[in-house]
């Protein structure tokens, strides 16, 4: 009877295992031929695995870039023209904007190469090749050695492998783990550093719907921006120079006007950030019941303060728009994620799976000895880890992550202070002062003291009441005691005394800084909090996180091994880790709730239905209204309407923003930019019924470029498939 129950449990696990659903997964390009190409072709894909990834010929991977290290972009012309999301290029658009040249509000279009705008610090990274180096990485390790020693060996081996891979070729390389440390791959990349802004629609198009519609379907956002990659005359990476020329890619995507229909094959090719599909129930409990609720609460407070300030002054709107968007994106995701985990009973399902797994482990002595301590070990580690994770995240949220900006900025003077204190070479000190003055100009350009003061009072109050005092920064405790927890009573005095809330005061202090004035820095109330919080995290929190995560790494590797042995017929895909991946699926609508079905596409008609000049998120540019009323749609229509967005079953996450959505012929049909609310929890558990990625229909982007912006010349360099 026991054996029968065990067999039934395994069958149920296999039937409902997410890893065998065709649409789920973020697959390693070099392994597409082995694991995925047949399924992809069954779903409609008409090309080969080598058309996706190859080191022997030009292929799709050669047109994909890691954009700025956080998004994806793709090349769409032989002259280095690159398209990504508006929200991926938002920081660059904002930095080029001012009240006189408000590109966020009005959009920007370079009508010639000379008008394209450089973006210092922005890079795009091309993958040259990847290679399984597991055997080399694990050389010198065994099951008996200490965890820390094992990690040291792996780190040392990885560094040597990466160094050897780039010897004499100018590339950059790194080694990344997969399957929780069971497998390791080497990635060899080429980085281009001259990337110029070519075009961006007004925020009323590129951010239409704003935070109201973020993570939500139906969607009507024209979320795209255009850049161009430049190179030296040898087509190799070069620092910005007027002498640079447009990069000539080995491959670029043809752009399709054929559109999408329900059931069409889709493939997303990009750089997904992080997922955690194979974690135990203890991890889900930590996220859903411990960390997310507290982080949602403090972010809500910060966002409300920023919104109030932005609504009061156009300049503050410019200064804080990108900051607020950055905060709100994760905030809304956490809300949807927690709701999704609850709706799908994820903790309960994980526990049921773990019970079945435990029965299988205990059925044989060898397995029991090998895997029997994993789940009890997880329980012990997560009891501590959830506390340290919360303290780390919350402390950063208060002091550094757009909590109190003056505190975050105060850390920038640390290097200069150390140089002065150690009586370093005068030229070094002068150079650091020059650099710091430049950094300060950028910071204060987007800083508002009164808004920061309101944030100070709000986050300090929450920190005082929501985090146990034993986890408080000591310098904060002294401040709290001095005002008896009434931070509103002391905020004016703090901001009057500090040098970090005023550009002129800060720059004057930096210019005059020497050993005689260092004492003033040590008495600055904002600097005291900044250094106190940094030291507290460095000394009391991060070492413990390192210890716990090292223990977790060992458990994770063993747990992954156990799961693979338990379901040996399954093909497991690795969690996302900011490396290039392929996700495939089909265009498909879904039921949001009982009797509520969402179609797979939206149109310009829906933009006009949402239009409301009284609501900032739904303000529509007059020119777009004119084009709609006159039905001046050009060749960018389907069934008489201009398509705007569509959804599909591709498994995506953060980092996939800007990824190309490719049809069965390998043509660009869309740009991935979001996920539907009901499936936001797909980082932890994929729901085939409701997990949908949201993409901009490429025809809407072309319509905006051509008809709205009058920049149709850009289409001339694309290969457009009618």
Image: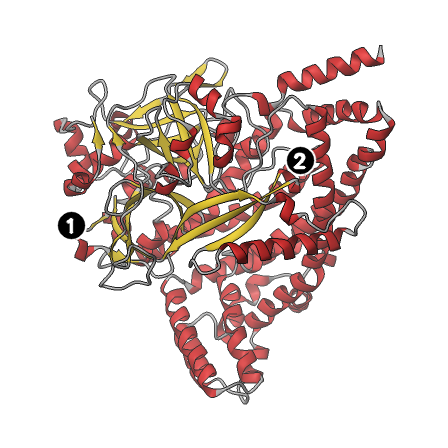
Q: Real-space Cα distance between discs 2 and 1?
A: 50 Å
Disc 2: which residue:
279
Quadrant housing the C terminus: top left
Instruction: Determine if residue 217 is in view.
Output: no
Q: Which numbered disc covers residue 558?
A: none
Instruction: Determine if residue 598 is in view.
Output: yes
Q: Residue at x 71, y 34 (%)?
A: 561
Q: Residue at x 48, y 84 (%)?
A: 513
Q: Check whether the beta carbons of the residues at disc 2 and disc 1 lie within 8 A of each other.
A: no
Residue 29 drawn at (x, y percent): 47, 35
Residue 649 drawn at (x, y percent): 45, 24
Number of marks in the rendered image: 2
Disc 1: which residue:
111
Compare residues 652 and 164 and report the one nearer the observer.
Answer: 164
**Left or right for 581, reference 13:** left
**Left or right for 368, reference 283:** right
Q: Secondary structure at mark 2?
A: loop
- Alpha-carbon neighbours of circle 2 within 10 Å: few (<14), some, or many (≥20)? some
Against 417, residue 571 (above or below) is above
Q: Secondary structure at mark 1?
A: loop
Q: Which badge, 2 or 1, comes first in the chain's sequence?
A: 1
Quadrant housing the N terminus: top right
Residue 172 drawn at (x, y percent): 47, 55
Compare residues 583 and 103 and report the one nearer the observer.
Answer: 583
Residue 421 drawn at (x, y percent): 57, 84
Compare residues 69 and 487 and report the one nearer the observer.
Answer: 69
């Amino acid at each position: 009877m026991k054996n029968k129950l065990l067999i039934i449990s395994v069958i149920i696990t296999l039937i409902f295992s997410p890893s065998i659903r065709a649409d789920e997964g973020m697959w390693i390009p070099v392994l597409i031929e082995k694991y995925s190409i047949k399924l992809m072709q069954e779903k409609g894909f008409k090309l080969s695995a080598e058309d996706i990834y190859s080191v022997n010929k030009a292929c799709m991977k050669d047109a994909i870039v890691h954009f700025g290290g956080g998004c994806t972009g793709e090349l769409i012309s032989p002259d280095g023209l690159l398209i990504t999301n508006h929200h991926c290029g938002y920081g660059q658009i904002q930095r080029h904007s001012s009240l006189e040249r408000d590109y966020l509000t009005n959009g920007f279009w370079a009508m010639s190469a000379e008008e394209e705008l450089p973006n210092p610090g922005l890079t795009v990274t091309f993958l040259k090749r990847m290679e399984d180096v597991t055997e080399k990485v694990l050389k010198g390790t065994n099951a008996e050695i200490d965890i820390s020693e094992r990690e040291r060996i792996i780190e040392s081996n990885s560094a040597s492998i990466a160094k050897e891979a780039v010897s004499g070729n100018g590339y950059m390389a790194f080694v990344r783990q997969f399957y929780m440390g069971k497998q390791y791959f080497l990635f060899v990349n080429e980085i281009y550093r001259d990337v110029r802004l070519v075009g961006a629609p007004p925020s009323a198009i590129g951010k239409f719907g704003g935070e109201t519609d973020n993570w939500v379907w139906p969607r009507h956002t024209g979320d795209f921006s255009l850049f161009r990659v430049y190179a030296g005359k040898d087509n190799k990476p070069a620092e910005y120079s007027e002498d640079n020329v447009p990069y000539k890619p080995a491959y670029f995507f043809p752009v399709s006007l054929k559109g999408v229909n329900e059931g069409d094959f889709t493939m997303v090719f990009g750089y997904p950030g992080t997922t955690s599909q194979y974690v135990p129930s203890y991890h889900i409990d930590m996220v859903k019941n411990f960390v997310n609720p507290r982080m949602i609460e403090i972010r809500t407070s910060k966002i409300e303060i920023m919104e109030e300030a932005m609504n009061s002054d156009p300049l503050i709107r410019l200064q804080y728009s990108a900051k607020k968007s950055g905060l709100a994106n994760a905030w809304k995701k956490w809300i949807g994620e927690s709701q999704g985990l609850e709706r799908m009973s994820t903790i309960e399902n994980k526990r049921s799976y773990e019970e079945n797994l435990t029965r299988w482990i205990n059925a044989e002595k060898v397995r029991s000895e090998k895997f029997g301590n994993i789940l009890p070990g997880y329980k012990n580690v997560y009891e501590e880890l959830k506390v340290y994770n919360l303290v780390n995240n919350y402390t950063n949220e208060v002091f550094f992550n757009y909590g109190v900006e003056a505190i975050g900025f105060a850390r920038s003077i640390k290097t200069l202070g150390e140089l002065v204190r150690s009586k370093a070479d005068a030229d070094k000190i002068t150079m650091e002062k020059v650099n710091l003055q430049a950094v300060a100009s950028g910071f204060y350009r987007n800083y508002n003291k009164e808004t920061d003061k309101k944030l100070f009072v709000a986050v300090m109050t929450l920190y005082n009441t929501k985090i146990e005092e034993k986890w408080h920064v000591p310098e904060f405790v002294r401040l709290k005691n001095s005002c008896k927890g009434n931070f509103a009573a002391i905020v004016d005095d703090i901001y009057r005394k500090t040098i970090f809330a005023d550009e002129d005061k800060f720059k004057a202090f930096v210019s005059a800084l020497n050993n005689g004035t260092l004492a003033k820095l040590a008495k600055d109330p904002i600097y005291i909090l900044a250094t106190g919080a940094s030291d507290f995290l460095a000394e009391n929190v991060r070492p413990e996180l390192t210890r716990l995560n090292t223990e977790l790494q060992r458990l994770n590797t063993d747990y992954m091994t156990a799961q693979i042995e338990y379901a040996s017929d399954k093909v497991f895909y690795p969690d996302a880790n900011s490396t290039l991946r392929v996700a495939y699926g089909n265009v498909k609508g879904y039921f949001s709730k009982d009797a509520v079905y969402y179609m797979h596409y939206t149109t310009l008609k829906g933009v006009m239905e949402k239009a409301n000049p009284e609501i900032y998120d739904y303000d529509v540019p007059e020119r777009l209204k004119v084009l709609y009323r006159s039905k001046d749609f050009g060749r960018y229509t389907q069934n008489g309407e201009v398509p705007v967005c569509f959804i599909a079953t591709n498994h995506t996450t953060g980092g996939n923003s800007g990824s190309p959505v490719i049809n069965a012929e390998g043509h660009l049909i869309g740009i991935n930019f979001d996920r539907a609310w009901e499936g936001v929890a797909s980082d932890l558990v994929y729901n085939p019924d409701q997990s949908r990625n949201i993409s901009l229909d490429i025809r809407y982007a072309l319509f905006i470029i051509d008809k709205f912006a009058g920049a149709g010349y850009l289409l001339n360099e694309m290969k457009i498939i009618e």
